[in-house]
Image (cartoon, rainbow, N blue to C red):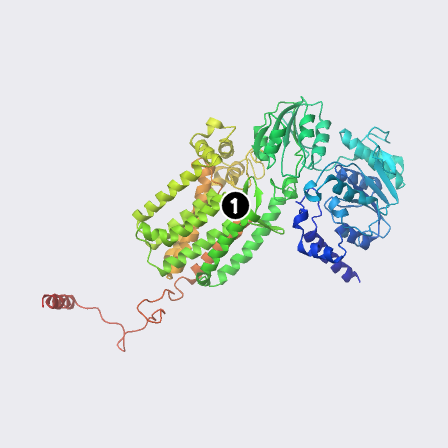
Amino acid sequence: MAATRARLQRICKEAVTAVRHVGEGRWQPPSPDCEVPLVAEAERRGTPIWSEVELGYRLLRPRLLGVTGTNGKTTTCELLGVMLQAPVAGNVGRALTDLDGQVEPGAWVVCELSSFQLEDVHELACEIAVLLNLEPDHLDRHGSFEAYRDAKLRIFERARTRIVPRGFGLDGIEFAADEPLPAEPLIRGVHNRENAAAATAAARAAGIPDPQIAEALRTFPGVPHRLELVRELNGVRYVNDSKATNVAAALRALAAYEDEPVHLILGGSRKGEDFTPLAQAIGPNVRSIHLIGETADELAAAIPGAQRDGDLATALHEILPEPGDVVLLSPACASYDQFRDFEVANGDPAYFLKRQAGYALLGLVLMVAASRLDYRVLRRLAPALVVTSLFLLLAVLVLGQAVNGARRWINLGPLVFQPSELAKLALAVWAASYLTRRRPPQTLKQLWRPIGLLATVFCVLLLAEPDLGTAITILLMLAGMLLVAGTPTRTLGAGLSIAGVASLLAVWFEPYRRARLFSFINPWHDAQGAGYQTVQAIIGLGSGGVFGRGLGQSIEKANFLPEAHTDMIFAIIGEELGLIGAAAVIAAYGAFAYFGLRIALSCKDPFGKRLAAGLTVLVCGQAAINLAAVMGLAPLTGIPLPFVSYGGSSLVVALVSVGILLNIAGDAGARRASVPDSGRGNSRPRAARARGRAGAARPRRASDVRRVSTARRGAARS
């Protein structure tokens, strides 16, 4: 029975996760017109659809204290969990079904319920149901405020006790922010006092004595990401209210700091709300407003004088606070366009480490597989790899998730895949295969067809993402392979010149690329603007000295250097590990280049030789461009540092490339060359064997050479 329950729990949780986006404000919900086909068919047939909380309720049969509303749900639920000394589940990030086997039937469980969860409940019955408030939210999902309200009010179906806001006209026990409490709450803000009043009313209804309630009110510190004081630096308080994903929540945050000077950061992904009430509520205490995300233009239209900054890192360095000021992130929007998921936005400190470790494990498994699989198989797969890469590069423009204005990633459940990384490997395999079968291009016309044409198609798709860095990497890799194959340097130079002109045009007609180019020439001219990233990288490298500040002791990565964990990670290495650590990284890439080219030179198979050269140039070329950009020797291009920068797709492809190189190295000289012998009709390699029974021919004497030469001249005269 227990095994059956566990299996049912696992299957239903996975199905519900795939069908209904459970989290409110954590994951982007599907719109009504793009419902999952399975759900649409089930609804058409009248088949019941359960949300995860419905399944959890049927499994546990607890005394459920449910909390819903537009804002304050998590704070109220966690406070109630302390008051009742009961587990908290639901929309707080812990599935209700996770409590199966941990709580007895009839035990108290506090459950945060979102409108998405309440849409699909049937038997769920709250012992105590709490409605905190109702403001327009998730209109992109529900279509209207009325539909959103109706979903929220389903919490009262089958509920025994109702806790409702005063003045809502609903039957039940009323609460309000101004009513007496057993103790004043530790958490600040009028809205949090209202949350405390609701929690107090619910706890009293559950039979909790006032002294226990008072102790919880006095000691409860609040929840992460809700007016959370992240850091106080030089007298400036940095407050994270990133769970304020609607206008009403942002208004509450502003009210909490109405008597203090505030620098406000707003923006994110569209949710269909009107920003006019927010604009009207911004008082004289708000010294500056910084807009991020895809709603920046809408917010700018509603709030005159606000500054568009694009992303959070840029906004933070644009703010110039004074001691006593508060820097408040209260976006009033969701953060789907700024971060790939809630954890990235709001913070498990080990999030990047855990993700990268998972990708590293996958990459190592694929590296071992690639080192044992005959690399010649890739030659037959080259066309399929190219077609697949082109398809994915097209798909990412439509299906890809926009992050900081670029569509480069496709979500695959818990994984995120960047098609451009596969494109590099696919093009390397195809080019090696083509240059093995055909004579290397000798003229510009031969260079254009088909290598130049295919490279242009790839680069155009990459620029549409936009991803100029990968386009440059691909051209550099192909240039290295053509040089090894025997293309004349004059022809190759002319082709690269044309590509260079095209790249300059791509830079010139894109404002942010143009700004990067000019800032490279003199980054200190605009050290707080376009040159900020380069300047901060140089400061980080220089401040490390010889031995560095110590591992994990970087100052630059604490909201000073944008993309510190990805493109600019070498600056953090220089700061934490000093000149010695930076030199060790550079030496490691030098060693990779040496051994990679040595493998290429020693390989007897032309396909393996060209492929090894291409993969070596791919890895080391990326490293050289990244290192030059971080040190201020080249413009910033967004190219990551192979094996080191955060990025799953890049790491996996780099490790697969290492596996292929190891395969080529182990095979070098051990097998016969696999290039077809054009002199044989069956296109198979000519086997090496002795000439006749006498073995190898003896060396000829000099007179023999002269005699043959004389005979040929005589034949020519006749």
Residue 541 vs residue 195: left or right? Answer: left
| Residue pointed to by mark 1 | 644
Q: Amino acid at mark 1?
A: Val
- Using the image, determine if residue 359 lies above or below residue 300: below
Residue in front for this viewpoint, 631 or 181: 181
Residue in front for this viewpoint, 383 or 469: 383
Q: Quadrant of the C terminus?
A: bottom left
The percent position of residue 626, horizontal first and vertical second, equals 46, 41
Q: Quadrant of the N terminus?
A: bottom right
Q: Identify the secondary structure beneath mark 1.
A: loop
Q: Can you see residue 585?
A: no
Outermost residue to the top: 284
Q: Exactly how many numbered labels are in the figure?
A: 1
Residue 261 vs residue 394: left or right? Answer: right
Name the image quarter holding residue 688. Answer: bottom left
Residue 533 vs residue 131: left or right? Answer: left
